[in-house]
Image: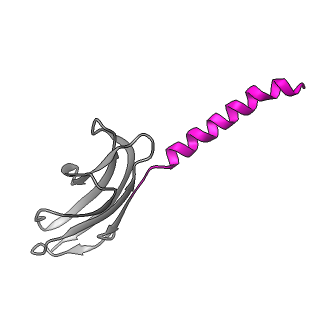
Amino acid sequence: MRISSIYPILGAALLACSQISFAQDASAKITSPADGARLDAMAQNKVVYEVVPGPKGDHSHLYVDNKEAAILKELKGSHTLEKLSPGQHDICVKVVNKGHTPIGVEKCVKVTVN
C-alpha cells in the first residue's frame, strides 16, 4: 500500500473522532436538589445547575414536569422555583440551541414536595 493512499483513510478517521469529541463536549448538571430529594412546599426551593453548551448548544432551559419554567442564560448558577404543589415532580435542565430547541443534552432529577 502506498503512503499517499493512507491519507484519505487517516483523514476520515480523524473526522469521525472529532465529531464524537464535539458531541461529548456538551453537558448539563444539577447539583441541587439531589435526585430523590424531599423539598418543603413552603420554602423557596432553588435549582443549582451547570451547563456546557458544546458546539451545537447556546444556553439552557429549566423544565418542571415537562413545562418550561425558565430560560437560563448563565452557564452556571441557580434559579428559584415557583411554589411546587405537594407530590412528585421532575426537574430538568436542557441544553438548547439559538432557536430554543433542545439538542438532546439534559439532566433531570425527581423530587418529592411535602
Q: Quadrant of residue 49?
A: bottom left
Q: Position of residue 75 (x, y in %)?
A: 34, 56
**Left or right of 41: which side holds 74?**
right
Q: Quadrant of the N terminus?
A: top right
- Between 56 and 105, the one lying in front of the other is 56
Chief secondary structure of the magenta portion: helix
Q: Position of residue 60 (x, y in %)?
A: 30, 50
- Between 44 and 86, the one lying in front of the other is 44
Q: Quadrant of residue 28?
A: bottom left
Seen in the picture, residue 27 relative to 3 is either above or below; the reply is below
Residue drawn 62% across and 36% down?
Answer: 16
Q: Quadrant of residue 30?
A: bottom left
Residue drawn 31% across and 55% down?
Answer: 93
Q: Residue 69: within the magenta?
A: no
Q: Quadrant of the C terminus?
A: bottom left
Q: Residue 12: within the magenta?
A: yes
Q: How many marks?
A: 0
User: Most extreme residue toward the front, as rendered?
Assistant: 74
Q: How is the image coloured?
A: one colour
- Between 40 and 86, the one lying in front of the other is 40
Residue drawn 21% across and 54% down?
Answer: 65
Q: Position of residue 25 (x, y in %)?
A: 49, 49
Q: What's drawn in magenta, residue-wise?
A: 1-28
Seen in the picture, residue 61 relative to 99 is either above or below; the reply is below
Q: Position of residue 6 (x, y in %)?
A: 81, 28
**Left or right of 1: which side holds 11?**
left
